[in-house]
Image: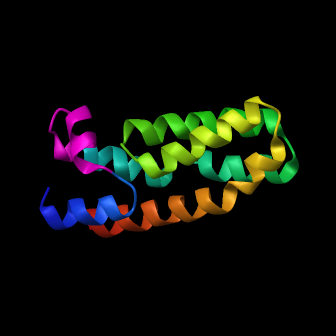
Amino acid sequence: MDAIKKQALAAAGIEADSALERFMGNEALLARFMKKFLEDTNYRQLAAALEEGNMEAALRTSHTLKGVCGNLSMFLLFDLLTRQVAALRAGNSEEALALMPEITAAYEQACQTIREVLE
């Protein structure tokens, strides 16, 4: 992966070198998993659960999405989701909801950048 692509990913909160280490340097495998991230439904499920007030489902999907982001070295999203999971576990739904604008912006930026870099 060239430096320009790594720089674009870094600007979106994705550490390409860390992700490549996790994928044993296999760029094709990393690209395949990043494309799968674009199809992952956990973000939409999280937003729907919070909108419906279903905090149990919100916790489950936020935690799952956090794990996916951690595996792909999407540290900006991972950090935001870690805070959200902690708020949900503490029963603080207001804090969990308040994090959604930042989570949404980071999620959309990550998706857009992945699309641009992988094309």
Q: Which residues are magenta?
A: 15-29
Residue farthest to the right?
53
The dominant secondary structure in magenta is helix
**Which image quarter holds the C terminus?**
bottom left
Percent coordinates x, y for residue 34 in the rendering: 36, 50
Quadrant location of the N terminus?
A: bottom left
In the rendered image, residue 22, in percent from the top left (x then y), is placed at: 26, 33
Residue 9 is at least partly visible in this image: yes
Q: What residue is at 28 percent from the left and 66 percent from the top?
A: 8
- Per the image, is 94 magenta? no
Nearest the viewer among 117 and 82 is: 82
Does residue 23 appear in the picture of this structure? Answer: no
Q: Position of residue 14 (x, y in %)?
A: 35, 53
> Image quarter for residue 24?
top left
For image coordinates 81% across by 38% down, the residue present is 55
Residue appearing at x 75%, y 36% in the figure: 88
Q: Quadrant of residue 33?
A: top left
Number of marks in picture: 0
State the image quarter where residue 9 is shown.
Answer: bottom left
- In this rendering, position of residue 58 left or right of residue 62: right
Residue 27 forms part of the magenta stretch: yes
95 sits left or right of 39 in the view: right
Question: For this rendering, which residue is in front, 55 or 76?
Answer: 76
**Residue at image coords 16%, 40%:** 26
Considering only vertical position in the picture, is 106 above or below 27?
Answer: below
Residue 73: x %, y % from top left: 36, 43
